[in-house]
Amino acid sequence: QVQLVESGGGLVQPGGSLTLSCAASRTIFSPNVMGWYRQAPGLQRELVTSINSDGNTNYADSVKGRFTIFRINNTASLQMNSLKPEDTAVYYCNRREWTDRTYDYWGQGTQVTVAS
């Protein structure tokens, strides 16, 4: 089992920047994908961005050009620039692994609030 610990959430001004980090408890050598989801009040959880073990990434259209995901060893980070009020949400780190079956692990969630 993998534990994911998130950090970096908080309050930021519109147009500002914030970096989230997600640290996994161990290195996985099987295929895996790490990503960030978010959920705002009244909306369903959505995939923001992901990165696989080969370094391939994808981004939701709403964050392209503003958010960047990168991965170093067991940690996946999300650099968020030009933040907008509509980015306000609880952000969840996710790791999907394939060993004997598919496993999904989730971070505890961290609040990001973009407001003046």
Image (cartoon, helix red, strand yellow):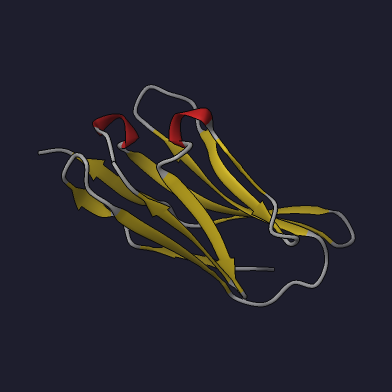
In the orientation shown, which residue stands out farthest toward the front?
A: 65
Question: In which quadrant is the C terminus drawn?
Answer: top left
Q: Is residue 2 above or below residue 69?
A: below
Q: Position of residue 52 (x, y in %)?
A: 71, 55
Q: Residue at x 24, y 43 (%)?
A: 113
Q: How many dots with numbers?
A: 0
Give the quarter of the image for residue 83: top left
Horizontally, residue 35 falls left or right of residue 14, namely right
- Foreground of the two, 20 or 45: 20
Q: Residue at x 86, y 62 (%)?
A: 99
Q: Is residue 88 above or below residue 30?
A: above
**Closer-to-camera residue (29/63):** 63
Kindly give the residue lying farthest to the right in the view shown: 100
Vertical side of 75 occupied by 116: above or below: above
Q: Is residue 40 left or right of residue 23?
A: left
Farthest-out residue, top = 42
Residue name at image x 69 percent, y 68 percent = 1
Q: Position of residue 77 (x, y in %)?
A: 48, 61
Tell which residue pokes out farthest to the left in this image. 116
* Vertical comparison of 17 with 31: above or below: above
Where in the figure is residue 17, as x and y percent of width and height? 27, 52
